[in-house]
Image (cartoon, rainbow, N blue to C red):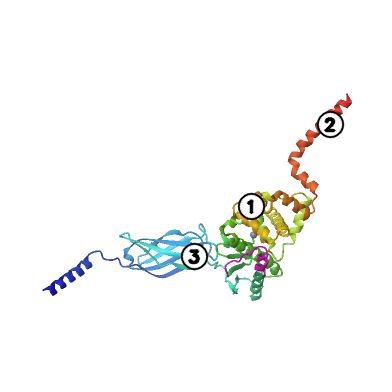
Amino acid sequence: MRFWLAILILTGSLISVGFSAIPQEAIVFNDPIVKIEFGEQINFEIRLESFEQAAEVFLSVQPQGESARVKPATITEDGKVIAQYNTRSDPFHPFAQIEYWYSVIAHDGQKFDSPHFYFEYTDNRFVWKSLENTQFEIHWYAGDLTFGQAALNTAEAGLRSAQTYLDASPPMPVRIFIYASPIDLQSGLQIPVQSWVTGHASTGTHIILISIAPGAEQQLEFERQIPHEIMHLLQFEFLGEDYRRIPVWLAEGSASLAELYPNPDYQWALERSAREQTLLPFHSLCTSFPREASGAFLSYAQSASFVRFLHQKFGRSGIQTLMRVYGDGIGCEEGTIAAFGISLGQIENNWQQEVLGMRPGLLAFRNLSPYLSLSALLMLIPLIIGLLALRK
Ligand SMILES: [Zn+2]
C-alpha cells in the first residue's frame, strides 16, 4: 500500500512537473557570418534553432576600448537573423578588434544572449602582406619584403629613439599598417582629417597607420613617420587618458623630436618666420594647430625646436615632469611654472634668443608693442609742451 502510494506521489509529481512551467528551449545560435564592405557597411548573419520563440532580435557591437552600440536585426522565415551596420555613419577605427553578440527577446519576454564573437575590421580594399617580431607587426600592400623589413627595423630604432625622451613602453606587439598614399589612409580613417595628414596613432588599440610609397624616399619617410607615431603611443602609456591634456605643442613637439630623420625644411621655415617676425606664440598652440597647411607646418617646426630646447635645458626627467604636470590638469601657461619655475612666455623668449638668434631688444619690443604706442605718446607730451614753450 505504502509502495503504491509512493508510486502515485512520484508519478503525480512527475505529471505536475510535466504540465506546469515548461522550461523554454534555449535558443541555439549557429554559423555566425560577418562580411565587411570596408567603409560602407558590415553584414551580420546567424542561424537560430527553435526560432519560433523569437519575437525580436538585436545585435550589439563593441569596438575595443569603446562602448557597445545596439542595432535592430530581422529574422527571416527560415530562422536566419540578419543585421547591417553602417560604417559610414558610425565608423570603426581600421583594424580594430570588434566584439559582437545577439540578444533574442522571446514572445514570453525571456531574453537569450548568444555567445560573444570577435572579428577584426580589416581594411580589405587592399591585399596586405605582413612581417612581425615580438615587438612589432608590420602590414603593407605596396612594395616587396625588403620594404616591410626596412619598416620593421625602423620601428625598432624608432622605439629606442622615442624612449630616450619618454620612459614608457607600449603593449607589444604594436601593429603598424603602411598605406601607399595619404589618400588611401585618409579614406580608410573615415574621420574628417586635413589633406596634409600622413599618419595616425590609435592609442586605444595600439595601431599605427602611416602612408609611405615604395621608392627612393621610403627610408626617410619611415624614419620620420614611424618614430613620430610610436611617441604618441608612449605618451598614452605614460599618462593614460590624461595624455589628452598635454598641450598640442608638447605632444607634437616631442613626437617630432623622436623622428630619426627630422624634417629638413623645419629649420628653414623657422629661420624665415623669425626674420619676418611671423612666429606663432606658443600660448596659441595649446589646444590645436592651425588647420591650413603652412600654419600647421610652422607649428610642427616650432614645437619640435622648442621641445628640443626644453630637453637640452631640463632633460628627459624635465620633459616627463612637464607632461605629468599637464596631465594633472594644470593650465598650458601655468604648467612650465609648476615644472620649471619659469613662465611659458619667458622660456619662449629664451628659445628665440638662444636657438633662433633673435635679439632680446626686438623681443621686448614685440612683447610690449600693444602698450608701446600709448606710453610713447605719454612720454612725448612733456617734450611737445616744452618745444611749444620755447617757440613762444
Ligand atoms: Zn603627431
Q: What element carries label 2?
A: helix
| Residue 251 appears in the figure | no
The answer to which image quadrant residue 316 occupies is bottom right
Q: Which residue is drawn at 16% across and 69% down?
A: 9
Query: What's the amino acid at mark 2?
Result: Leu
Q: In which quarter of the image is the C terminus?
A: top right
Query: Residue 263 versus residue 252: which sits nearer the camera?
Result: 252
Query: Residue 145 versus residue 260: which sits nearer the camera?
Result: 260
Residue 196, image x, y percentages: 66, 58
The residue tagged 1 is 288
Q: In this view, does 73 lie to the left or right of 242?
A: left
How far apart marks 1 and 2 lie (CA) works out to 47 Å
Instruction: Give the class, few, some or many, for how many residues have Cα within 10 Å of label 3's Cα (few <14, many ≥20).
Output: some
Q: Is residue 123 left or right of residue 343?
A: left
Query: Residue 27 versus residue 304: which sits nearer the camera?
Result: 304
Over which residues does the magenta segment extend? 157-172
Q: Earlier in the sequence, mark 3 or mark 1?
A: 3
Q: In this view, does 377 lie above or below 315?
A: above
The residue tagged 2 is 383
Residue 380, image x, y percentages: 81, 33
Q: Is mark 1 on a helix, strand or loop?
A: loop
The residue tagged 3 is 98
Instruction: Give the class, few, some or many, for how many residues have Cα within 10 Å of label 1's Cα (few <14, many ≥20).
Output: few
Q: Residue at x 66, y 65 (%)?
A: 162
Q: Which residue lies furthest to the top in this view?
A: 392
Task: Report ligand 1 position as a quadrant.
Answer: bottom right
How far apart marks 3 and 1 lie (CA) works out to 30 Å
Query: What's the amino acid at mark 1?
Result: Ser
Question: Which label sits in the foreground, 1 or 2?
Answer: 2
Query: What's the amino acid at mark 3?
Result: Ile
